[in-house]
Image (cartoon, helix red, strand yellow):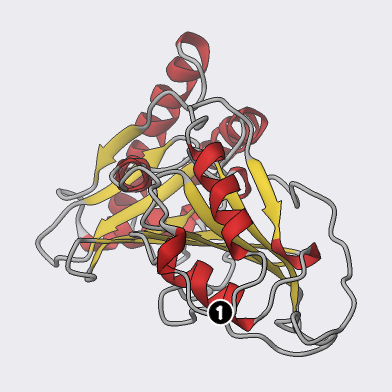
Amino acid sequence: MKTFPIPVTVFRAGPTQPRPNETVEIEPSSMPQAEPLVTPAPPGDASDDELAAASDVVEQILRAMRAAQRSTRFGAGSLRLSLADLEPGARHALNQSLGQGEVSALVRGADGRIDWRIQETAFAGLWRVQSDDPSGADLLEAGDLPESVKLAARAGSAAQFDCAQLPEGVMNAPALVHELRARARQIGEGRPAQVINLSLLPLNAADHAGLATLLGEGPVSILSRGFGDCRIASTRAQGVWRVRYFNSMNTLLLDTIEVVALPEAARATAEDYADSIERLEELLGWMRGD
């Protein structure tokens, strides 16, 4: 995972910004819960058959990851392996063997209900993806981000922000809206993120409220942990994301709007992917007692 994409600047206290050391809660209900990090280790209580079935899955996804690394541009697509036919004991052995990493995500449908729950394994670029429907899909997926996230991110409408919808009392929000509208026309896969750092701008309460209303809530929310939390939420406008960084005390350090196809802070890099392949090879040998 990438670290902060732009430098963190400690901003001065004032009526338009949170005070230093103030705890800030931002849309806690829409964010994934912070799952505990789990070190990958084959469970000691798994039977030989369960561990063998789990290791077969690791071998399949590893073979596909190696082939994709050699033949395609990283990030062009994901590799998906269904676990629907895997016995519960073998699935448990697989989950424990893969562990849990720093990134979690939720994808919601048009009705606001959760469609997909996503958890990165301890191997960056390898994801556990589950439909929230008990009878739905259960996948192991390799890629920079799961396809369910990418599809939901592309489903947003084009940015058509209307400054007339801003509330009375706004100060700098109209200028930001015009800037967002212009930047949103330049979105494309592979283009770098265009970042608007709200932490450094003189915005009043009406500005913040107006921007929140115009942007709205999109279908994707992502929690990326490392040195604190990075909370990422799509908006109703395609390619426009709210990205906020918090320290370990839940104090807001950096509040940004990113205009980009997919936020880099949540994506596995090609280097992550290559490292995960090497580590999965070691895991497979461990699982098979080589």
Residue beneath the point at 89% across and 69% down: 10
* 67 vs 21: above or below: above
Seen from the viewer's position, the closer of residues 169 and 215 is 169
Quadrant position of residue 18: bottom right
Seen from the viewer's position, the closer of residues 121 and 235 is 235
Badge 1 is on which residue? 26
Quadrant position of residue 245: bottom right
Q: In the figure, is residue 77 to the left or right of 110? A: right
**Which quadrant: the C terminus?**
top right
Residue 287, position as x, y percentages in the image: 48, 45
What kind of residue is marked 1?
Ile
Residue 80, position as x, y percentages in the image: 30, 36
Residue beneath the point at 64% across and 65% down: 244
Residue 113, position as x, y percentages in the image: 22, 71
Q: In the figure, is residue 258 to the left or right of 86? A: right
* 268 vs 178: above or below: above
Q: Specify whether residue 19 is in view.
A: yes
